[in-house]
Image (cartoon, rainbow, N blue to C red):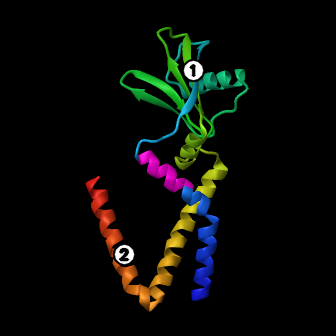
Amino acid sequence: MQRGLIVVHVVLASFYLPMGVMYAITGGLYGLGIKGSYETVETSVATEAPLSKELSQLVAIAEEALRDRGLADPTGGAGIKTSGTSFHLEWTGTERDVEVHPTEDPMIAKVRIKDTTGYRRLVQLHKAKGGELFKWFAATWMAGLVALFLTGGMMAYARKPFRVLALVASLLGIAAFLVLASAS
């Protein structure tokens, strides 16, 4: 049984190492305010009807601006962001974000196309802004990470020299998590 746990643990750790490093780096740096950057282009687009909070209208304007530049749609979801009486479309993805904003003229929309830099692309993947395949891979990473912790814990508790160390470390980890989560 111990050998089987070791094999599963080694395979999971090795297979998910790149994913773990990406999540650790992007998550840690994001918490410090390092989020990556964009290369942004703004343009004005004439509309056929006054701009409204209708998602389909705003997405159609964004799609037209992207097609005019030969660019693909963002891989994530589109939604309307509101603040008071103002609104805009925000459509995010791994490689680019698109925003559609109203202007003083209700028949003109401002379109902002924001292409991600290399590091920002990784941040977008971390934030589940990628395509469906990567989202499924991230879900397997989550299950793999839990299995990695479980197999590591089982191996530690199964070996007498590591039992007390594993128990103390587990209790300290639970306490640190609870204190820091409640204090945040």
- Occupied quadrant, residue 174: bottom left
**Whole-percent x and y of residue 74?**
63, 35
Where is mark 1, residue-wise? 111
Q: Is residue 53 left or right of residue 141?
A: left
Nearer to me, 144 or 102:
144
Kindly state the secondary structure of the residue where label 2 is placed. Answer: helix
122 up-or-down from 88: above or below: below
Q: Quadrant of residue 6?
A: bottom right
Question: Which is more foreground, mark 2 or mark 1?
Answer: 2
Determine crowd level at label 2: few under 14, some 14-19, many 20+ residues with C-alpha closer than 10 A. Answer: few
Which residue does the image show at 63% across and 40% down from the upper left? 75
Q: Is residue 143 above or below residue 24?
A: below
The residue depicted at 45 percent of the width and 48 percent of the height is 29
Which residue type carries mark 2? Ala
Q: Residue at x 52, y 27 (%)?
A: 89
Residue type of the residue flagged with mark 1: Val
Image quadrant occupied by the N terminus: bottom right
Please provide the residue range marked out in magenta: 22-31
* Disc 2 target residue: 169
Q: Quadrant of residue 161?
A: bottom left
